[in-house]
Amino acid sequence: MGILDGRVAIVTGAGRGVGKAYALKLAEEGAKVVVNDLGGDVRGDGADISPAQEVVDEIKAAGGEAVVNGADVADWDGAKAMIDQAIDNFGALDVLVNNAGILRDRMMVNMTEDEWDSVIRVHLKGTFAPCHHAANYWRSESKLGRQRDARIINTASGSGLFGNIGQANYGAAKAGIASFSIITARELSRIGVTVNALAPRAQTRMTEGLRDVSGEMLERRDPEWIAALVAFLASPAAADISGRIFAEVWGFGYTVGQGWGHGPRAEASRDAKNVEESLRHALAAAGYNHGIERDTFMNP
């Protein structure tokens, strides 16, 4: 018996990398899975459904149930059709894992409008659109007296939570997803839906070239460490966990983010000339933003 027996899940961006690991782990634990992937490259160019189909074939070969979906998750109608596909094929939807994403890294002063727009579209709208359509299904079920114990698991990033030079577009999108997750957790709690987000640290094609890792570091970046947390959050046992941002998720552990907090307060003034002294005292007492690497501050 798996911890997800009888549950139906969608995983976006599941043809490769951590998304593939999520889909395989959810299926291993008994879920029926819609494996979504447009099949583009890291920059979002092109389309090829074959990686997602291969994941479906692997799930079926292991005795599980899965169907392929090649929708662009940031397309409003495509996202709706994906939700409908899960319901039409498996009779329900219980879990939505939003993982699809692209990278178009560049220093902000050199970044093009298209590099900004495309990354924001895939990550932010590509999270919002599936969530919107799934939430409407769950709300309808609740009104009919069939409230489901549903889950949304979104993908944030250390780049968005802590800041990473050269990723203004990606970091802004991922920070937005974190805030979106906190808000939707509050909005959807009344209909039995939990919403959480996690920032994975894995070695995949999305992270190739960022740094050279080997040995234990490479092993701890195996996506399966992350997939185990996703499977747990998707399970009935996690019904009381919502509105959480897991700020670092990998083989070295799962960090629970503590969120924004109010720090030292400077005295307010209507006169700009009187602001500096009190403000500088408050700044001196305040800690810096944490860096992506533990025990660091303000990423270099």
Image: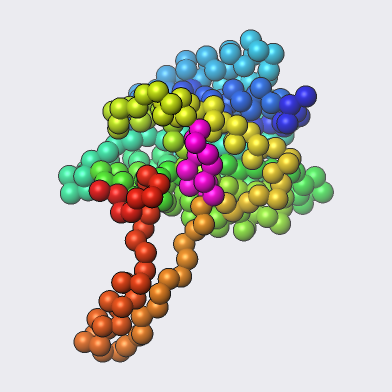
> In the image, is 28 to the left or to the right of 268?
right
Q: In this view, does 111 lie above or below 261?
A: above
Q: Where is residue 98 in the image (x, y as percent from the top left)?
A: 52, 38
Residue in front for this viewpoint, 300 or 79: 300
Q: Where is residue 291 in the image (x, y as percent from the top left)?
A: 35, 50
Quadrant in the picture for residue 119: top left
Q: Position of residue 72 (x, y in %)?
A: 46, 32
How was this image coloured? rainbow
> In the image, is 278 to the left or to the right of 243?
left
Identity of the residue furthest to the top in this view? 61
Identify the residue shown where x is 33% and y is 35%. 103
Q: Position of residue 46 (x, y in %)?
A: 35, 24
Residue in front for this viewpoint, 158 or 179: 158
Identify the residue shown where x is 47% and y is 37%. 200
The N terminus, quarter of image:
top right
Identify the residue shown where x is 37% and y is 64%. 287
Query: Where does the magenta region start and end?
Result: 245-256
Magenta span: chief secondary structure: strand
Quadrant in the picture for residue 56: top right
Identify the residue shown where x is 48% and y is 55%. 179
Q: Mark yes or no: residue 129 visible.
A: no
The question of residue 269 being in magenta is answered with no
Q: Mark yes or no: residue 243 visible.
A: yes
Identity of the residue furthest to the right in this view? 145
Q: In this view, does 134 lie above or below 37?
A: below
Total of numbered circles in the picture? Answer: 0
Identity of the residue furthest to the left in this view? 110
Q: Is residue 239 above or below residue 287?
A: above
